[in-house]
Image (spheres, rainbow, N blue to C red):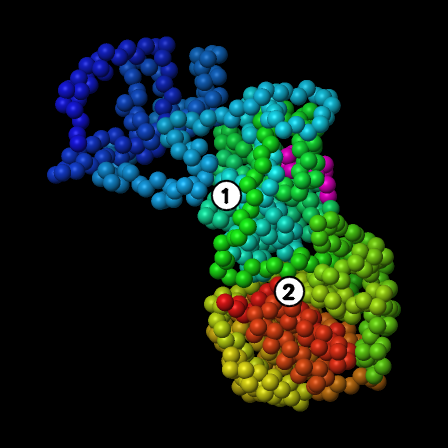
Amino acid sequence: MGPRPAELAAAPDVHDALAPGQDRFILIAGINQETIVSVRREDDKFLYGLSFEGDGTVPLAFAQLANVKTYFVEEGHGSLPNNGEVERAVIDLLETGRTSVLETSWTPSRRGVLREVPAARLAPEPFNGRTGGHVSQSEFRNLLDEFAAPPHRTGSQFVAPVGTAVKPVSEKAIVIGRKRQQRIDVRLAHGSITQVDTRAVVIGLFSGVTPSGAARAIDQQLDGVISEFTERRMLSARVGEVFIMPANRYRMGADMVAFIGLGTYDDFNDEVLRLAAENVARVLVRTKIDEFATVLMSSGSGIGAANVLPNLVKGFMRGIQEGDDQGRLRGITFCESDRERFDQMHREMLRLSATSLFDDIEATVEIITLPPEPAVAVAPTRAVATAPDPVYLIVREMPDLRPQETEANPAASFILRASVLTAGSKSTVVTDTIDVDGKALNDCLQFIETRDFNHVSLADFGAQLTDLVLPPLTRKALEKRQDYGLVVIHDARTSRIPWETVCIDGQYLSAGAGLSRKYEAEDLSVAKWLEERRLASDLKLLLVVNPTEDLPGADAEGKRIEKLLKEDPQIQITKLEGREATWSAVRAAFRSGQFDAVHYAGHAFFDTNNRARSGIICHGRQVLSGFDLANLEMLPALMFFNACEAGRVRTVRDRKKGEATAKRLETNVGLAEALLRAGVGNYIGTYWPVGDAPAKQFAETFYGAIMEGESIGVALKRGRSTLREMPSVDWADYIHYGSPQFVLKHKN
């Protein structure tokens, strides 16, 4: 089917009948957009010539008229009316007849037809073949963007004067506006953020805290990818840092997820929230995102909507005003699934309408209800964490600005600040400080070296330690967390405290739902385990035994583990023992990508001056340090280190008080830090040498749970419970750094 000959012949007459250009006409032309400017026939098909001399729809040659002044702007045809520079130029032209906003001349970098394409190439399949419910409302709305500007949302016109009293919640849309510089549609959405139709969703992350609430809901729609990225330490959550990840339109209504760092929850404040909101808004508008949705970030820390929303809005508006000079951003949606908090958010938005926040922006506020989340989600391709959110405890030494020695005395007193982030729907942050008597702490730790330290005396030891290191308010907050796991985030000074033994009113922090640790450091490497090993049915264990050949206890540990685990056909053991465990051999095994875990029985080395140089001692007393592993692309997901010594002697003879314990704690934690900095995902170690029977029982229970597909946190909890029932004091000996929800072996 071709053009009708009669109409084609009459076309030139139509052009001749058009009014000629006049000096009172002004043309604003879009340029530098790939545009069809010519067509020719070749055999039985048409070839269309493409050039940058046009706005993507209309060739520049078709638009220009003789005797008409032309202004040029790099913009597409449908977006010309919404371009900020075009709007300012039109105002100038109407008021003065001239403008300096747009250029009056333009020379293309390359003239003429740049390439030719057949007709089939010009008609791509709409929405990549998606139809029906798989095409979003925003995609439908933008369908004609190439030809016409997107329509403005309509609503009742309400301009709130300054000082207007807050009225009861209204379900009608309102418009907040004073100067018509830029218009933004603000939607308050009741429901899950996973169901909102938008270009991007924005989620705030606290450092060291597993995503929960809205982030967990999104995680479930994305097959646990957020959990994996968190476990890999890919999301640092530094204040104001933005991380953008593509989303799945088939599972949720957004094209991408933008994560914004909120720092640590104990340092969080209004200023941090405003900075975070400003940064993420600036990133989105600079990348030409025209709408996004978010939640009341940090509301899970107990801060109410009346405090969160104003700071979010202030930050967003500042980022938009500074970064969106062309007025691209059109809409922000605030989502809240809890009805009570949603009503609070609505009332607060009405109050904000009477403030100066919207002096320079016209905002239409609309109330919407999102559809419910599907009752049955699409089956995930990997395990998604479903355990309750843990309680978090941040402990760190308060900075002392007084003059002091460069090398701090381990026995010196210091101020400890502790902050608890509780779990559940009414979570909150409780912060308190305590003066720690360094000498009393060392004396307490020294008791571990005596024969009197056993499962009977552990409760008194834990109670004494609690009095020394836990402030009253945080202690009270932790009394009610027995149903939740605990994650302790500590700095170097507080790392030597055996938090696993802390006992509050007869309840141990590490009992119940369990305890894991995270090291507070900004330069920890991304974890580098090989994902295909987690999906494999077998567990491959590298067993490194007594490389220095001077630890009978390490030899016994190696034989015990080998005998215990080789009976399971799904566990494959590779052993490097004694002289075999050279620096080169151990490093090659680490980097091979063949192993899920390393079980090391031998000496560790701690460098007080350069912690990254700490590591395990190989044959010939060469140290395989964290620095040596840092640049390797693959590492095992788990490092298990048993503190083996020549003999388990609990005596203080010939030792300074507390020196052996302090040194061992420092070495063990230092090794953990070095390996975490290198990229090991999880580390399990011990404070003191474990007895033979408890060590055997713990290993059997721990690795058994791992092979059942349980998380490290569950496996650790089972191992501790087994030893506690023996009974043995060694149940409180094991420490874990990493994610308690990490699953070493996914079970299909």
Q: Is residue 480 visible?
A: yes
The percent position of residue 500, horizontal first and vertical second, equals 75, 69
In magenta, the rendered stretch is 303-315
Residue 740 disc label: 2
Task: Kindly identify the amino acid type of the residue bearing the numbered disc 2.
Answer: Pro
Quarter in which the N terminus is drawn: top left
Relative height, residue 3 to residue 378 (above, below): above
Find out whether residue 287 is within the magenta segment. Answer: no
Residue for point 27% across, 22% down: 62
Relative height, residue 286 to residue 17 (above, below): below
Q: According to the image, label 1 marks what residue? A: 253
Relative height, residue 386 to residue 8 (above, below): below
The percent position of residue 181, horizontal first and vertical second, equals 55, 23
Magenta stretch prevailing secondary structure: helix
Q: Which one is earlier in the sequence, the residue at label 2 or at label 1?
A: 1
The percent position of residue 3, horizontal first and vertical second, equals 18, 27
Find out whether residue 309 is within the magenta segment. Answer: yes
Residue for point 62% across, 20% down: 158
Q: Secondary structure at mark 1?
A: loop
Residue for point 45% across, 15% down: 93
Q: Nearer the viewer, residue 136 or 318?
A: 136
Residue 236 disc label: none
Relative height, residue 434 to residue 706 (above, below): above
Give the Cα separation between the discs numbered 2 and 1: 31 Å
How would you rate the neighbour count of disc 2 (Cα within 10 Å): few for under 14, some for 14-19, many for 20 or more?
Answer: many
